[in-house]
Image (cartoon, coloured by chain):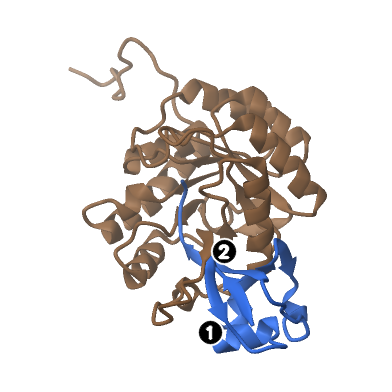
Chain colours: A blue, B brown
Amino acid sequence: MNIHVNGESRGTGDGQTVAGLLRELDIRTDRVAVELNLEIVDRHDFETRGLREGDRVEILSFIGGGAN
Amino acid sequence: MTTMNDRLVIAGREFHSRLWVGTGKYKDFAETKKAIDASGADVVTVAVRRVNITDRSKENLLDYLDPKKYIILPNTAGCYTVEDAVRYARLARAAGVSDLVKLEVLGDEKTLFPDTAGLIEAAKILIKEGFIVLPYTNDDPIVAKKLVDIGCPAVMPLAAPIGSGLGIRNPYNLKIIMETVKVPIIVDAGVGTASDAALAMEYGADAVLMNTAIAGAQDPIAMAEAMKYAVWAGRLAYKAGRIPRKLYATASSPIEGML
């Protein structure tokens, strides 16, 4: 199925979960926030939260920043 | 009095350093880490952004800054609307470990001055959700008081526009803020060099937050160390109590015993 990850279209397996997607992308789960269709997914739900065709996933983390 | 037993407490949390630093604009993470260590800061601000999913070779800032050693203070930098600021604050909390957020709602790209009406509105929403909101605000005593009244446990008025290095543009307003509100004041943004930081502390600020003044210096590590001592010196001078300014001289040596 096709989903959007950080604004880019991407294919992933049917029945994929948030945790599965993060593993696929080689992203550690302990330092990211995941927004699924504008709703924040609790880290504890990553393993169980399934993705659907057309879902919009945003994966964010901390970067260097002061202000602006 | 030493700096050791002079701790800053905000919302029940104890902060060891009165110099807080941003982590942007450094050459690389190694330089960021060295500068922060030289500054002695235990509070570091970070921004929240999309993870680079196409190039996973990029290192993570938190590999260099152990969240157990530093207090990670996420900001809502780059947000120009209440909705965006609230969204980023929620994402920061989801990505991190605490309810702390440095709230920025910017009003204008050229000055990066805060949109104080939006700031108050966003702060209200986040405080209701249990956030500890540290608001980046203008040097406006009335807005500072409103932010405290709605539940902000500290306020962060600017010294000058972000990254400008102009130093404290309106010391009188900052002093009025310090008299008006009874929460810690963290002077945030606009510091250019060590004397600016010392001055902010001498006026009675509880802490100073800076990024560009260190990261943009020709030698960021040396400037970080300079800022550490400046903040200490300013704090100690404030606690010590300066002499009043007088127009004419007062001799320091006794007249008695002169020939």
Residue occupying image coordinates x 44% and y 25%:
B243
Do the residues under discs 1 and 2 have CB atoms within 8 angstroms?
Answer: no
Q: Which mark is residue B90?
A: none
How far is disc 1 from disc 2 in space, using C-alphas?
25 Å
Is residue B97 in view? Answer: no
At label 2, the amino acid type is Ile
Secondary element at tag 2? strand
Q: Is residue A58 left or right of residue B109?
A: right
**Residue at which label 2 appears:** B72
- Looking at numbered disc 1 in the image, what kind of residue is underneath it? Leu
Q: Position of residue B251 (x, y in %)?
A: 30, 19
Subunit bearing disc 2: B
Closest to the observer, B248 or A55: A55
Q: Residue at x 75, y 73 (%)?
A: A42
Look at the image and tell me whether residue A23 can be seen.
Answer: yes
Mark seen at residue A25: 1
Query: Compared to B97, does B26 lie above or below?
Result: above
Kindly indicate the quadrant of the structure image that contains residue B197. Answer: top left
Badge 2 crowding class, 10 Å Cα cut-off, few under 14, some 14 to 19, many 20 or more, is: many
Q: Residues within 10 Å of mark 1 (few under 14, many from 20)?
A: some
* Position of residue B20 in the picture relative to residue A52 (left or right): left
- Residue at 52% x, 86% y: name it: A26
